[in-house]
Image: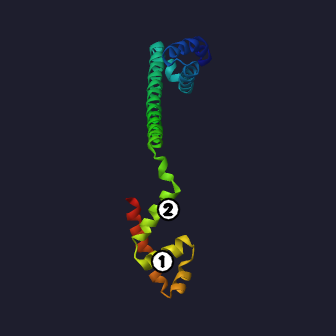
Amino acid sequence: MTFDEFYILWYSRMKRFAREYVISEDDAEDIVQDICLELYERYDLFADRANRTAYLFTAIKNRCIDHLRRKMIEQDSFSRIQEEHRLTLRMKFDSLEVLDDNLFNENDIEDVIRKALATLPERCRQIVVLHKIEGKKQKVIAEELNISLKTVENQLTIAYKKLREELQK
């Protein structure tokens, strides 16, 4: 029997068998096509087999198992990703629900900043105000206060550290 004769005789049976397990018509067709391609490439070895039917259906069974295993892994991964996304949404939703509307009150924010600035030493506070509030460059501040640029940098570093600590409270 030639491969063409074999293909015509067995293709629909193999596909129907695969279809019972993989559900999708396209997946069943892909599995059978892959097996037929392998058989075509090595048909001389297949033609010599005593029990070709057992070989064919065992090959289809194994391909269906591989396919279903892969689908289950994909589904599990998808479910995990979906659950993580759901939990993220839930967390964001919950955090927005408990968010204090008064937190964004402009007067309160100004008070918090004013109190934090008040904790700084005078010279340090002056440098921060000139730099961050008035928008002056460090070099201009150094010239204006008649101090070195390095002193301005050090004072800003100290101020940022203290402000960070204060504002975290």
Estimate the spatial distance between the alpha carbons at disc 1 and disc 2, rounded to whole Å.
17 Å
Residue kind at label 2, given as amino acid type: Glu
Q: Is residue 14 above or below residue 96?
A: above
Given residues 160 and 58, the one toward you in this image is 160
Q: Residue at x 49, y 47 (%)?
A: 101
Given residues 92 and 124, the one toward you in this image is 124
Q: How many marks?
A: 2
Question: Where is residue 9 drawn, in percent x and y?
Answer: 58, 11
Which of labels 1 and 2 is toward the front?
2
Residue kind at label 1, given as amino acid type: Gln
Query: Label 1: how many residues lie within 10 Å, few (<14), some (14-19) or many (20+)?
Result: some
Residue under pointer 2: 110
Quadrant hosting residue 40 = top right
Left or right, residue 146 beside residue 165: right
Q: Is residue 61 above or below residue 158?
A: above
Q: Is residue 81 above or below residue 58?
A: below
Q: Is residue 154 visible?
A: no
Query: Label 2: how many residues lie within 10 Å, few (<14), some (14-19) or many (20+)?
Result: few
| Quadrant of the frame with the N terminus | top right
Q: Is residue 49 above or below residue 66?
A: above
Q: Residue at x 38, y 64 (%)?
A: 165
Residue under pointer 1: 126
Q: Secondary structure at mark 2?
A: helix
| Quadrant of the frame with the C terminus | bottom left
Question: Where is residue 166 drawn, in percent x and y?
Answer: 39, 64
Left or right, residue 81 beside residue 37: left
Q: Is residue 99 visible?
A: yes
Quadrant hosting residue 84 = top left
Question: Where is residue 11 drawn, in percent x and y?
Answer: 58, 15
First reached walking from the N terminus: tag 1 or tag 2: 2
